[in-house]
Image (spheres, grey):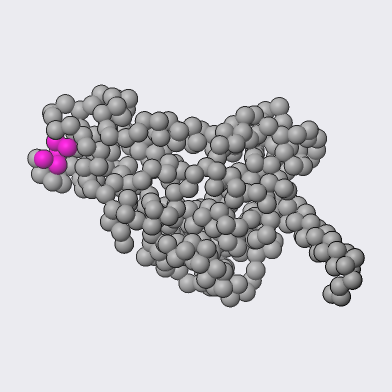
């Protein structure tokens, strides 16, 4: 395992410009809006969390599985694949990568239970399907399975690493220079930290805080102004996280209103939300209808995308056959 983030495959091969993220969704954007693709990401992350909970896996495994899932879909389209199967495979591989392996039979059994709870009836019963998908997933990940997360950095920033007496007097003085965060805020930060995307530290003094003093910094603003971090990146990350919550709310509002169709929106749906550099949430004309659950809404969306994709592929095949026939070729 690489001890230094900046020398790792994560830093050197898996940090992508926004243009790459947008280009990766080209096929899917033919069948769904940018906001709807964001809903699929949220729904899939929820599926991963529920599956990991049933399997007794901890948050780092969840975060690793979500990263694997998003990396996979940098090279693949939702309309061409089975996202719940990919998500379950990501959990299975992430558990191995984080050294808490699970049996494939358990992964499939629990994944089917979660799918049943969420209303998805198409998850395969054959254990070999997930086992086969594991190899495809690892290949798409370029065999890079080490993921760096902000959890360790978070507890260091808050001075919670190693306990109150770790490192002796010097360790105590260093922790007093860190951010004073109450337990509730720390737990909230822990829950959302895997969205942050900031590289973790490669040593305990990553923030290059001034020499220790006896006074604790009074607030987060003072603390953030004192550390060696690009504040523009912090602001961008905060905006991304807030946009994610707005997108999540838009999914719930749209589902409650029973609105369907590509780009569906309601008056309560936020418009102009930036996600991956693209404004989302500004949908087309929707129509009122029967209220549906979030799970049902996303499953209907996935089914629609796959059907439309299959129709397009079939039409392309017919066009190819007609072109060959007009040239006098035999199929």
Q: Position of residue 284 (x, y in %)?
A: 75, 34
Q: Quadrant of residue 323?
A: bottom right
Instruction: Judge from the rendering whether residue 139 lies leftward or rightward of residue 39; answer left or right.
Output: left
Q: Quadrant of residue 263?
A: top right
Q: Nearer the viewer, residue 211 or 330?
A: 330
Query: What residue is rendered at 85% in x and 68% in y?
Result: 324
Q: Nearer the viewer, residue 16 or 167?
A: 16
Instruction: Judge from the rendering whether residue 22 lies leftward or rightward of residue 304; answer left or right.
Output: left
Report the span colored magenta: 170-174
Query: What residue is rendered at 64% in x and 46% in y?
Result: 37
Locate the C terminus and report the quarter of the image it occupies.
Answer: bottom right
Q: Is residue 221 visible in the rendered structure shown here?
A: yes
Is residue 12 located in the magenta-colored stretch of the structure? no
Locate the N terminus and report the quarter of the image it occupies.
Answer: bottom left
Query: What residue is rendered at 13% in x and 46% in y?
Result: 167
Q: Is residue 209 above or below residue 73?
A: above
Instruction: Judge from the rendering whether residue 220 lies leftward or rightward of residue 269; answer left or right.
Output: left
Q: Position of residue 224 (x, y in %)?
A: 31, 29
Q: Nearer the viewer, residue 118 or 151?
A: 151
Q: Is residue 160 above or below residue 126?
A: above
Q: Position of residue 176 (x, y in %)?
A: 19, 33
Q: Position of residue 103 (x, y in %)?
A: 48, 72
């Amino acid at each position: 395992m690489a001890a230094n983030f900046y020398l790792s495959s994560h830093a050197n091969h898996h940090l992508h410009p926004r243009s790459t993220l947008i280009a990766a969704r080209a096929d899917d954007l033919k069948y769904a809006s940018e906001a709807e693709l964001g809903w699929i990401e949220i729904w899939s992350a929820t599926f991963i969390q529920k599956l990991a909970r049933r399997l007794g896996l901890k948050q780092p495994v969840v975060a690793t599985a979500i990263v694997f899932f998003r990396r996979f879909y940098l090279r693949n389209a939702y309309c061409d694949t089975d996202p719940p199967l990919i998500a379950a495979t990501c959990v299975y591989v992430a558990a191995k990568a984080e050294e808490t392996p699970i049996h494939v039979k358990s992964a499939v059994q629990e994944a089917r239970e979660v799918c049943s709870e969420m209303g998805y009836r198409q998850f395969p019963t054959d254990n070999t399907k997930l086992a086969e998908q594991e190899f495809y997933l690892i290949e798409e990940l370029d065999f890079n399975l080490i993921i760096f997360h902000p959890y360790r950095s978070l507890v260091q920033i808050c001075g919670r690493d190693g306990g109150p007496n770790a490192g002796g007097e010097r360790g105590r003085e260093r922790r007093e220079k860190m951010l004073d965060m109450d337990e509730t805020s720390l737990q909230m930060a822990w829950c959302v930290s895997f969205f942050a995307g900031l590289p973790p530290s490669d040593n305990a003094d990553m923030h290059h805080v001034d020499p220790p003093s006896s006074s604790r910094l009074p607030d987060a603003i003072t603390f953030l102004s004192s550390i060696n971090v690009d504040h523009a990146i912090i602001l961008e990350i905060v905006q991304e996280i807030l946009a994610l919550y707005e997108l999540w709310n838009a999914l719930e509002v749209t589902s409650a209103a029973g609105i369907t169709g590509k780009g569906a929106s309601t008056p309560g749906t936020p418009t102009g939300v930036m996600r991956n550099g693209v404004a989302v949430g500004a949908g087309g004309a929707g129509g009122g209808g029967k209220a549906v659950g979030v799970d049902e809404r996303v499953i209907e969306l996935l089914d629609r995308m796959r059907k439309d994709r299959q129709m397009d592929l079939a039409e392309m095949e017919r066009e190819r056959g007609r072109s060959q026939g007009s040239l006098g070729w035999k199929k």
